[in-house]
Amino acid sequence: MTLPRRRMVWIAALIVAANGFLPVLWILFTSLKTESELMRYPITWWPQDPTIANYLRAFADQPLPLFMWNSLVVATLSTVICVVVSALAAYALTRLRLPYRDLILQSILAIAMFPLIALMVPLFQTMRGLGLLNTHLALILPYVVLSMPVCTLVMASFFQDIPADLENAAMIDGCTRIGALWRVVIPLAGPGVFTAAILAFVNAWDEFLLALTLNSRQTMRMLPVGITLYQGEFAFPWPIISAALIVAIVPIAILIAVFQERVIGGLSSGGVKG
C-alpha cells in the first residue's frame, strides 16, 4: 500500500471513529454537568464541576431499573428465538435442495428492507386481537420476525462454507440431521452465529417505534421509551436525559467490548464469504 493511500485509509478510519465516539463523549460530558453550566456561554466542553447528581435523579425520577429489566427480558428472549429459527432457516437454504431457493433468498432480503412504519397498523391490530398488548410477548414476536432476515443471511454465509461431509459423518455415527446441525455445524460456524445474535440483541435493545406503540403501560415500558419520559411539557432536562442515555449505552458497550474480536471476525468473514 502506497503512502498516500495509507494516509487516506487512516483519515477515513479517524472520521468513522470520530463519528461514533464524539457524540457519546458529548453525552457523557453533558451527564456530568449541572443545568447552569450547560446553559453557560461560551460553551464549556469539559465539565468544570463534575457531578453524579444527574445519575441519581435519573434513577429517582423514573423507574429506570424496571425499564432496563423489560428491555433485557425482551432483547434476550427475542435473540434466543431468532437465532434458533434463523439457524434452521439458514441450514435449510444451504443444505436442502429447495425449489425456488434464489427467490426465497431474494424475498428474505426484500423483507429486511421493508419499512417498519408500514407494519405498525397491522401489527397493532394483530396484537390487540390476540390480547398481547402491554406484554413482553407483544414485542418479542415482532423483533424475532424483523431480525430473522439479517440473521439468516449472516448464518447462511457461514454454513455454506462448512463441508457437508462433516455432517454426513455425524449422521453415519447416529446423529439426526438436526443433531448434526447443533453438534457440528453450529460450533464450526460460531463466529457467524454469535454475530447474528449480537445484531438481533442490539436491534431489540435500541428499537423505539414498536416499543412505544405496543406497550403503553408504565410498568411495561422499554428503556428507549422510558428515557423520553424525563421530558416535561415546558422542560427538557438534558443532563438527566444524558445520564439515562449513558446508562442505556453501557450494557451494549460492555457486550461489544467483551466480544469485540468475535463480532469483528464474524462480520469480516461473512463479508468475504458472501
Image (tube, rainbow, N blue to C red):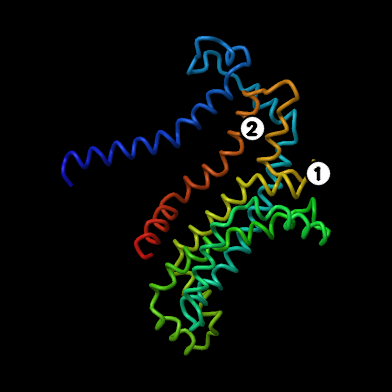
What is the number of the mark on residue 244? Answer: 2
Front in this rendered view, residue 212 or 202: 212
Q: Amino acid at mark 2?
A: Ala
Instruction: Kindly identify which residue carries mark 1.
Output: 217
| Residue 23 horizontal side relative to residue 71, left or right | left
Q: Position of residue 273 (x, y in %)?
A: 36, 65
**Viewed as shown, does residue 44 lie left or right of 235?**
left
Q: Is residue 48 above or below residue 104?
A: above
Q: Residue at x 57, y 22 (%)?
A: 32
Residue at 71% x, 31% y: name it: 59
Q: What residue appears at the point 43 percent right and 86 percent down from the top-left corner?
A: 169
Is 209 above or below relative to 183? above
Residue 79 location (% of width, % of height): 60, 58
The residue at the point 61 percent across, 61 percent down is 80
Looking at numbered disc 1 in the image, what kind of residue is underneath it? Arg
Name the N-terminal-most of marks 2 and 1: 1
Q: CA distance from mark 2 to mark 1?
A: 20 Å
Q: Secondary structure at mark 2?
A: helix
Q: Which mark is residue 186?
A: none
